[in-house]
Image: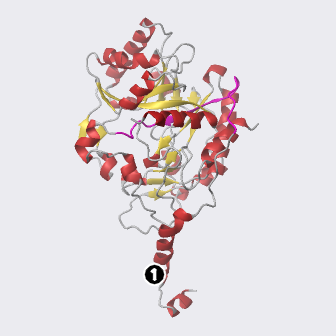
Amino acid sequence: MYKLLEKFGLSKNEKELTEYIDYVLNSQLDRSNFVKPIEDKHVFKDDDVKLIAYYLPQFHDFEENIKWFGRGFSEWSNTSKTQPQFIGHWQPHIPIDVGYYNLETPNTFKRQIELAKQYGIYGFCFYYYWYSGKKIMEKPIQKFLADKSLDMPFFMFWANEDWTMLWDNGEYKETLHRQQLQQGDAEKFMDDILPFMKDERYIKIDNKPLLVIYNLANYPYDKYMAFNKRIREIAKENGFDDLYIMSVVKGVYDFCNMKEVTDKYNLNSMLEFFPHGLESWWGDTTRELDVKVMNPKFSGKVFDVASYIANKDYIFDTNTKLFKGCFPNWDNTPRRCYKEAQIMQSNPADYKIWLKDIINWTKEHKTKTEQFVFINAWNEWAEGAHLEPDQRYGYAYLRATKEALEEK
């Protein structure tokens, strides 16, 4: 074959480059996988497993982005300029339906909730950025709280990581806000979050408002435990039976033996937050796909999600309470700006298998009040993890979600 190419003056490398250029220029024209919206709506039933989608409230102007990157910057700025790194690489992800929205626009939430509920999403889990009283990206969720017509159950995920410049150039060059627990933070934290918890839409288990705390290891152990104790006390002082505190599976854990983690940190449950927690699985080099990356500046890895799903490696027993989760797709090339990116491309059919399996697992292993499954995410566009419709697949992931929930 290459002799034939040479006859026309093309080397093997030139042929690969030609195919790559053709893919970059024309892949957005491929509509073969596009799924149109449906008219029928999911009818929520008492015995449904409740599907929760993580929600990023980032798409609007706020102080930190304006200071570092200029007015108008959001993750749309990175997602829209990302290019495929190899033939078959799905980039850029181009939103349709709600489009390139601004979360300060009133109708955005309304359309998102309409879509989510139509396809079986029970509620949103809002990322909450809080630094000893300093809040970031809080305006959209404050607007949500104030507008009682937005009929969507929700709860908070405290994303307690340092705030850095990662969004613009893929590197941790500067830290503006550091995570630390100071004297009186438990009181300040609960003062800020109690208005949400007292809202009738806030999700509770047995009169215990749900709360995810992302990284427990960020603080000295004694400080965290004092904080944990005090926020639980404050919840009880405000009429709740307690808090229902969860943390994510992050790092290389033995998924089957996490009781020591929940006991150590006084947690009600652990939470799968893929792709975090898969490090031991992804760490096997046989899980990497051999692709021809065309950009010499790209330093990421491409993993084989299909074999993970085919082998049902997500089904296992564990010795503590664990909420199951999955993602429709993962590709943080836009956020990492090609530096140490992780690409885990999936498709709606495989995603449906994964989701349906963990829905069934949840029905078998969780009490009625704790039957929740978590999807990462509703709108993590810069990490390729979104249920919101896009130009390539249309409404396929939403439809797969609905079918996984409804099929027996």
Considering every residue shown, the one lying at the far bottom of the view is 7
Q: State whether residue 146 is above or below residue 297.
A: above
Task: Inspect the magenta stretch and tell me whether residue 52 lies in it.
Answer: yes
Q: State whether residue 165 is above or below residue 9.
A: above
Pick the front one: 258 or 278? 278
The boundaries of the magenta stretch are: 40-60
Q: What residue lies at 41% left-to-right and 27% top-to-bottom? A: 143
Give the residue number, with chain letter if any, for mark 1.
Answer: 14
Q: Position of residue 381 (x, y in %)?
A: 46, 47
Q: Position of residue 338 (x, y in %)?
A: 38, 57
Asked which secondary structure carries label 1, the reply is helix
Q: What residue lies at 60% left-to-right and 60% top-to-bottom? A: 31
Q: Toward which corner of the image does residue 34 lie, by quadrant? A: bottom right
Callout 1, which amino acid? Glu
Q: What residue lies at 34% left-to-right and 35% top-to-bottom? A: 161
Q: Quadrant of the C terminus?
A: top right
Q: Is residue 124 visible?
A: yes
Marker count (numbered): 1
Q: State whether residue 237 is above or below residue 274.
A: above
Q: What residue lies at 43% left-to-right and 51% top-to-bottom? A: 332
Task: Inspect the magenta stretch and tell me whether residue 118 lies in it.
Answer: no
Q: Quadrant of the N terminus?
A: bottom right
Q: Position of residue 405 (x, y in %)?
A: 68, 36
Q: Position of residue 201 (x, y in %)?
A: 52, 20
Q: In this rendering, would 137 be left or right of 304?
A: left
Q: Toward which corner of the image does residue 223 lie, by quadrant? A: top left
Q: Main secondary structure of the magenta part?
A: loop
- Near mark 1 (Cα within 10 A), the count class, few <14, some 14-19 or many ≥20, is few
Its colouring scheme is: secondary structure
Pick the front one: 210 or 37? 37
